[in-house]
Structure formats: structure tokens, C-alpha cells
Image: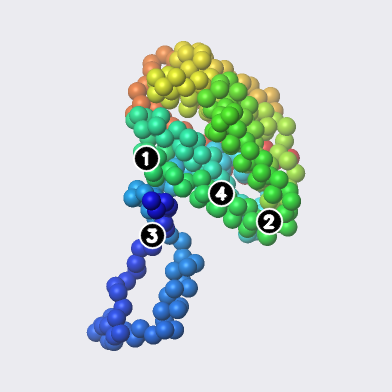
Amino acid sequence: AAQSSARPVFRPTGGSVGAMSVGINGKPAEAETPKRRSRQSALSAIRMPTEWNTNGARLDWKTLLQISRPGWWLVHVWLYLAPTGQKYHVLYTLRFWVGLIYALFPLNLLVYGLNDYTDVDLDANNSRKGNFMYGAKCTREQMRDVPHIIVLMNVAGIGALCVLTGYWWQLAVWLVVCFAVNAAYNVEPLRLSSNGPWELPCVVCGFSGVTVLASLVNDLPWASTGYWAHMTCLVLRTQLWTEYLDYDPDFKCGRRTTSTLVGKRMSKVLVLFFLAAEAGVTWFFFEDMLMRIFSFLGVAAFVGLEVLRGTDDREKKKAMKMQNAMGLSLVLWVWHKGIFAA
């Protein structure tokens, strides 16, 4: 039997061309010639596919974008911009923008795509899936070639950064460590995502790599000590919160996360603990009053909405969108003030 494989599909941009056809305004179009056919073949060879055909299942760029979770891109923006605060000169460099674009799409595709690849059966019963906030809901056939796409896009992205920066071996090591951390989180035999509480130090290590990348790409010192403490609290409370949101489907299938280990009530307590720790770190390390107020408002909002009142899934999504909007404003303020930069 012939083996099936993913085939890139190119959407035609015009009609078929015969020996002679009518063009715009009734004028004759360019005749089909060997030279023209050769040029069209060359363009088709280098053009990116608009979708992939995997065993009859369609995987297009919109689905890949959903897999990368644009609703959570703000996290990588925060992490990438941390060491570049008040360094206005980097805004005029190509390496800064290529690094930021890489951190937003190819890197997020690696982080979340590998997770979705190993959680296809679990995600099929997750009602939150199928959007740009929580990711696409795909079949196993659609996800079959996602690892290949992830590898190609990340190797190409880091390769471009190597050319721009000249840091070949440093970025090569960074990419190997990045793949290793994500494999440890998602893939057997470790698969720390289902071996709580060991997934927690793994995600801290993984997300801190974005800030390390920013320092490498932009040739800047590492971020301040206070930033690393703040980032650790931010990543841990976000991870625990997302695990809490997935508590029911995870518990039903026997998945062992920190949240399913401690239960729903203790999950909320842990989120509140790291929110309070984040506020404490902010007060201790940073003198910026706006950042301090934002941190304590986060604690108060969580207590009011989740501990005292309780919210449904729709309200949680709305609250997260508002948090993203406020977070983006705070990111710009923190960068302008250079709060995290060394």
C-alpha cells in the first residue's frame, strides 16, 4: 500500500493559462511559453504553501496561528522586552524585530504545538479549544506533520538570527536547550506536563529562555535580579491558573498536574499565593508606583472574582482579555521606564 504523506497545497492566484487568453480590459494576456512556464515553476517552488494536506485532513495557516495561542503572545512580549527596556537604539536594528517576531510565532508554535500534538485525544473533549486564546481543536491527522513544521520554522528563525548577530554557537546551544526543555515537558518518557509538580520548574526554565534569547540577540546584559524573581512568580501563577482552567478534563482522563494533585480549592490558594508573592517582589525590588498598584490590584481582583464570587468560563475569558489589555499597557510602561533592564 502506498504511504500517505502531508502535501503542501498552493492556492492558485489566477485562472489557467492557455496558448493565448484574454487579460484585463480585453487585452490579450501573455502567451504561454517555455520561459514563462519555467518562471512560474520557480515561483511555485519558493512560495510558502497556504495549507497542508495530511491524509485528507486540512491544516492551514489559520490553524497554525490558533495553535500558537495569540491570546497568550503577551507573555513572550513581556519576557522578550525585559532586558531591552530604555535601550532605544535596539528599535532601529533588524535583529530586534526579527527576534521579537520569532519569539511571537515560531517559538510559541513550538511551545504550544508540541503540547497539542501530544494532547490530541484530551483536547478533543475540551470545550475551551478552537479559538485564538486557548488553541485549535485538531484531529490526529491534522497534527501529524506539525512537529516537522515546528522544526523547520524554528531552525529557520534561529538561522536568520545567527546571520544577523554572528552568535552561531550560542544560538545553536540555545535552540538545542529549548527543544530539550519542551520535549521534557511534552514527550515521553519524562512528559513533565503530566507529572506534577515537576512541570512547574520546567515551565519557569522554558519561559526564562525567551529573556535569555533577547539578551543574546540584542547584545545586552541579562535582566536585573528583581526581574527574575518577578518572572518566576508570574510564570508559576499563570501555569497554575491554566491548569485550574483545565482541571475537569484533566481530572477525568487521569492526568496528573499540580492542580489535579492538590484539588480545585488548593489550586486557587496556590494562584493567590504566587500573586501575593509577585506583589511582594514588586514592592521590594521596584519603586515604580504604577507597577506596585497593578500587582496589588491583581491580587484584589482574583480574590473578588474567584475566591469570593466565582466566575463561569465566559467570564473567565472576558477577565483574561481585560488583563491582556491592561498587561500590554503595563509592558509599554515598564519598557519606557527601563524597570527590568540591568
Q: Residue drawn 36% across and 26% down?
A: 313
Is residue 42 shown above or below 282?
A: below
In the rendered image, the quadrant that contains the C terminus is top right
- State the residue position of label 1: 139
Separation of residues labelled 3 and 2 (CA atoms): 30 Å
Q: What element carries label 3?
A: strand
Q: Distance between the residues labelled 1 and 2?
A: 35 Å
Q: Position of residue 271 (x, y in %)?
A: 53, 20
- Please report whichever mark, 3 or 1, sits nearer to the chain's N-terminal start: 3
Question: Pointer 2 and pointer 4: residues touching (CB < 8 Å)?
Answer: no
Tag 2 residue: 162
Q: Which of marks 3 and 2 is in front?
A: 3
Asked which secondary structure carries label 1, the reply is loop
Disc on the earlier residue, 1 or 2: 1
Helix, strand or loop at mark 4: helix
Q: Distance between the residues labelled 2 and 4?
A: 16 Å
> Residue sitting at 47 percent across and 43 percent down?
68
What's the distance in space between the residues labelled 3 and 1, CA to CA? Answer: 19 Å
The secondary element bearing badge 2 is classed as helix
Q: Position of residue 27 (x, y in %)?
A: 27, 86
Q: Residue furthest front?
A: 1
Q: How far apart are marks 4 and 1 (CA)?
A: 20 Å
- For the residues labelled 3 and 4, the Cα–Cα distance comes to 19 Å
- The residue under label 3 is which amino acid type? Val
Identify residue for label 3.
9
